[in-house]
Image (cartoon, rainbow, N blue to C red):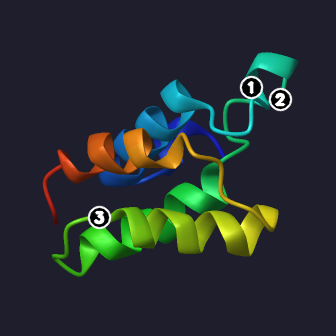
Amino acid sequence: MHRSDRAPLLDRVLEVVNRHDPEGLLGLGAPADEYESEARALTAVLARGDAITVADVRQVWVHSFGAAPDSLTALARDLARLPAA
């Protein structure tokens, strides 16, 4: 999906997730939207007006990748700084 087709909140969440690149996929040459499905799930939490927690991020990651790397704590902290919708 092209960036212009996404909602601004999703763009911000995806930007944070990409900056962390928890699975190292972007570093291996994966496309910039590699984590979009995870970003969409996390954006839904923010869209409900809830703050992102480590548990939220771990749940999304385990669902997508089967495991949750330790680096998710830092990712959750940065996502929690985003304003809820």
Along the polypeptide, which appears first: circle 2 or circle 3? 2
Mark 1: few/some/many CA within 10 Å (<14, 14-19, 20+): some
In this rendering, the answer to whether 29 lies above or below 57 is above
Return the x and y of residue 45 as percentages of the image width and height. Answer: 34, 74
Mark 2–mark 1 contact, CB under 8 Å?
yes
Q: Residue furthest front?
A: 70
Residue 11 visible, this orientation: no
Left or right side of 69 for 51: left
Q: Amino acid at mark 3?
A: Ile
Rounded to the nearest whole Å, what is the CA distance between mark 2 and mark 1?
5 Å
Mark 1–mark 3 contact, CB under 8 Å?
no
Task: Return the residue at label 2.
Answer: 30
Q: Amino acid at mark 2?
A: Ala
Residue 14 visible, this orientation: yes
Quarter location, residue 58: bottom right
| Disc ID at residue 58 | none
| Disc ID at residue 26 | 1
User: Callout 2: helix, strand or loop?
Assistant: loop
Left or right side of 43 for 40: right
User: Callout 3: helix, strand or loop?
Assistant: loop
Rounded to the nearest whole Å, what is the CA distance between mark 2 and mark 3?
25 Å
Along the polypeptide, which appears first: circle 1 or circle 3? 1
Return the x and y of residue 32 as percentages of the image width and height. Answer: 68, 30
Mark 2–mark 3 contact, CB under 8 Å?
no
- Residue at 65% x, 61% y: name it: 37
In this rendered view, identify the residue nearer to me: 50 or 7.
50
| Disc ID at residue 52 | 3
- Residue at 26% x, 73% y: name it: 47
Mark 2, mark 3: which one is toward the viewer? 3
Q: Amino acid at mark 1?
A: Leu
Return the x and y of residue 42 as percentages of the image width and height. Answer: 44, 65
In this rendering, the answer to whether 66 lies above or below 28 is below
